[in-house]
Image (cartoon, rainbow, N blue to C red):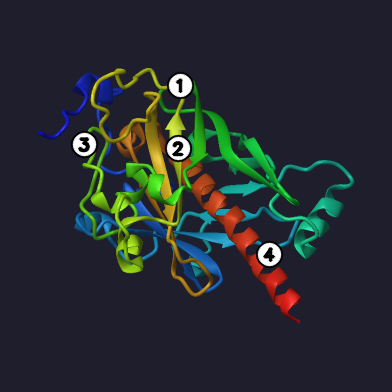
């Protein structure tokens, strides 16, 4: 059988290509990794097939605050080094909920109840694009699944004004099933894999799905968990019934970003996640504000899951005593 044909070019475009790389607080590569370096998180280029997009020198650094309710959870800075004392280009926090907010923070800090999904507040500071006021965007938790004392959000929704001039809605959707992860997630999670983009034909399903696979092969081919950012309000849809190329969901929605975490995680693992822009986002057509928001919300989702992993490890340590 021949390779499936890509969707017509008209269905994959939303205006002229603006940039070869997505635009963020500074020019970000289409594919990047989040790395743990000391007490901070660093964004570095992760596409070895494109020398201009691969660098060990950090592009951005992110401050992470544990258990401090008076500070944002994550602050993304303009430069890649703390010593530069660069300005904050975006930060994210839990919104204030009144006088009893300190009680919920205390419970979260000491681990009385972990994993509660909450709506987050994203702030893009004033001064960007001539704005006189801060731009505030909500990251809303949807599709909450209860499990014992835990509550998990499988979807986060964001509505914001993009460079198209429209208010658009995006959703981060959890794709954590190991053997059923979306192609867009597990194809993009390793830096040494060939670069892929929206419109490329989907690969044939590997025979490893039905065969017993060694752990080494499994680690190379699949990620531990992944999320996909879908553009719900895109004017372009992949035609139903035609071969679905990369960059489109089964429902025909455009995929604008994916993030994947390695199977083995922990403080000793340097790479925390791999991120890739797709479609209009990869071409810079959604604007710099969107790139900031997509980048920070992806890191925030990883941060939520990492805090929960740490809480579970602490509980296991206490039970062994």
> Where residue 169 sits: x, y (%)?
51, 26
Q: Is label 1 in a helix, a strand or a loop?
A: loop
> Where residue 9 sits: x, y (%)?
20, 23
For marks 4 and 1, the one nearer the N-term is 1
Mark 4 or 2, which is nearer the eye? 4
Residue 87 lies in quadrant: bottom right
Distance, label 4 to label 2, CA atoms, is 27 Å
- Give the answer, above or below, for where 165 lies relative to 173: above
Name the residue that disc number 4 marks: 311
Name the residue that disc number 2 marks: 229
Q: Are marks 1 and 3 in contact (CB under 8 Å)?
A: no
Distance, label 4 to label 1, CA atoms, is 37 Å
- Give the answer, above or below, for where 1 lies relative to 35: above
> Where residue 132 sits: x, y (%)?
59, 34
Rendered image: mark on residue 200: 3
Rendered image: mark on residue 139: none
Residue closer to the observer: 135 or 250? 250
Distance, label 4 to label 3, CA atoms, is 40 Å
Q: Are marks 4 and 2 in contact (CB under 8 Å)?
A: no
């Amino acid at each position: 059988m021949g390779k499936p044909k890509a969707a017509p070019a008209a269905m994959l475009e939303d205006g002229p290509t603006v940039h070869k790389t997505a635009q963020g607080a500074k020019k970000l590569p289409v594919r990047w990794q989040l790395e743990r370096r000391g007490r901070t998180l660093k964004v570095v280029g992760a596409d070895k097939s494109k020398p201009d997009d691969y660098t060990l020198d950090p592009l951005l650094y992110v401050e992470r605050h544990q258990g401090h309710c008076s500070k944002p959870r994550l602050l993304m800075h303009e430069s890649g080094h703390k010593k530069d004392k660069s300005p904050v280009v975006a930060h994210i926090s839990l919104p204030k909920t009144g006088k009893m907010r300190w009680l919920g923070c205390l419970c979260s800090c000491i681990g009385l109840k972990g994993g509660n999904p909450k709506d987050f507040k994203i702030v893009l500071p004033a001064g960007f694009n001539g704005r006189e006021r801060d731009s505030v965007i909500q990251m809303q938790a949807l599709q909450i699944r209860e499990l014992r004392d835990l509550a998990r959000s499988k979807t986060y929704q964001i509505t914001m004004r993009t460079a198209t001039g429209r208010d658009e809605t995006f959703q981060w959707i959890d794709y954590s099933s190991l053997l059923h992860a979306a192609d867009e997630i597990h194809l993009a999670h390793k830096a040494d894999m060939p670069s892929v983009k929206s419109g490329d034909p989907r690969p044939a399903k590997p025979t490893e799905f039905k065969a017993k696979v060694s752990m080494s092969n499994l680690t190379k081919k699949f990620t531990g968990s992944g999320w996909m950012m879908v553009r719900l309000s895109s004017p372009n849809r992949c035609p139903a019934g035609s071969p679905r190329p990369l960059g489109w969901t089964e429902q025909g929605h455009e995929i604008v970003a994916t993030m994947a975490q390695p199977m083995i995680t922990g403080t000793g693992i340097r790479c925390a996640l791999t991120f890739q822009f797709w479609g209009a986002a990869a071409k810079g057509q959604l604007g710099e504000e969107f790139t900031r928001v997509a980048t920070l919300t992806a890191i925030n989702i990883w941060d939520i899951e990492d805090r929960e992993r740490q809480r579970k490890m602490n509980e296991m340590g206490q039970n062994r005593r």
